[in-house]
Image: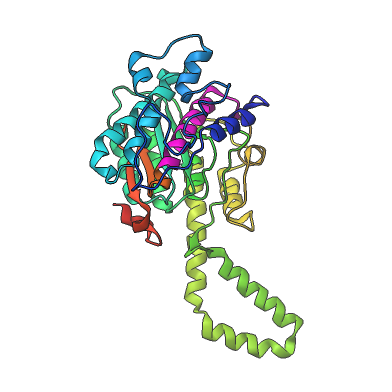
Amino acid sequence: MLPFQVDAEAALMQSLSMTVPPTDAPAPTAPEAPSSGQDIAPAQAQASPTGTPTQNRDQAQGTSASPRSSAIDPYQEFLRLITEKYPLNRLDDLRSLVRQILETEVQAKSIAGTYNWLVIHDPLQMARPDADRIYRAIGTFRERRPIALIITSGGGAIEPAYLISNLCRESASMKFVAVVPRRAKSGATLLCCGADEIHMGQMSELGPIDPQFNGLPALGLKNAVQHLAELASQFPKAADMFAKYLAISLEPVSLGHYERVAESSAQYAERLLRKRTVALKGTPADVAKHLVYGYKDHGFVIERTEAESIFGVDMVKSGTPEYEVGNSVYIALSIISEMCETAGYDLYLYGTPNSECVFVPRRKHAGAPPSFRG
């Protein structure tokens, strides 16, 4: 990892940040800047380089953009379409632009042909149908190569994470690598356990894999009972009150159920870790147990150095070409997602860079269970 890489990424994201006008306002036309003067690509009035990441890269390399890219900038064209009154009437065009942008970012790298590339970009939660999407995407590969999976996810259900990891492992030639440009938390960390290598950067983070129920940790119930027991020992006269409270509010079977679910997460992780082809720092059982029981907070940040202390330096890689590809794809999808969010949509993608992304109206999924996506 180059020391200035994070600053460069931050500068690029800042220069590409914008505020899209309301959907009922006149949509900007490409290649002109929006009428309200917002920044979509780097501000054209500035003396610094302007245009999209692809155009800036071409200028830096001393090459000129193709006639098509100079005539129609894919980012501004996407913005124009997504801010129309009925943008999903142009769904095929929107998806085509996302494919064009992602394919350009991947193919610009020297290792593009080394791997079969997969992408998970999920602002919601991983669910069963997502494993089917990865299964279909793998079926489109023309030849068997190592698989590189670029992951941006806050997690989700345990089962699809396990299935996706197994799919990638069994479908890869030689090795399966996970690339984490920013976040692969919870179930996404479990998915990474099945990879031979986890490629991370200075802003990358994994997380504990203890199960959650309605936003609360499954292990929290056991911890609460232990705390009440400690209070009863400290205040013997209140022991009867604590006992009555537990009898009213807790069924013993619930305590056993939550503990077994936590143990199940450790079992899934252990099975995935056993399949790796590189040396692991500890035993699969010890690493899995640490990921489930070793942290007090489910949101704990397991950054690169912490990940190295858990998995070992043979499994956790940094400053690699694989990470560069993942980071470029992440930045492109972040720009597109910001456009979608300001227009009232979430964008998520499970598949190859050439797969069809999905646009979900934000007003419909607020508060809905993750399985609604179908």
The quadrant in which residue 332 appears is top left
For the N terminus, give its image quadrant: top right
Image mark count = 0
> Seen in the image, is 363 located left or right of residue 268?
left
Residue pictured at 68% horizontal, 26% vertical: 3
Front in this rendered view, residue 61 or 319: 61
- How was the colour assigned to the protein in this rendering? rainbow
Q: Tell whether position 320 is magenta.
A: yes
Q: Is residue 252 above or below residue 97?
A: below
> Can residue 352 be seen?
no
> Seen in the image, is 55 located left or right of residue 299?
left
Q: Position of residue 222 (x, y in %)?
A: 58, 69
Q: Position of residue 123 (x, y in %)?
A: 44, 47
Residue pictured at 36% horizontal, 57% vertical: 363
Residue pictured at 49% horizontal, 79% vertical: 251
The quadrant in which residue 306 appears is top right
Q: Tell whether position 333 is magenta.
A: yes
Front in this rendered view, residue 66 or 114: 66
Q: Position of residue 34 (x, y in %)?
A: 42, 35
Residue pictured at 54% horizontal, 85% vertical: 247
User: Farthest residue in the top direction?
Assistant: 62
Front in this rendered view, residue 364 or 369: 364
Is most of the magenta stretch helix, strand or loop? helix
Q: Position of residue 163 (x, y in %)?
A: 38, 45
Over which residues does the magenta segment extend? 316-339
> Can residue 154 be seen?
yes
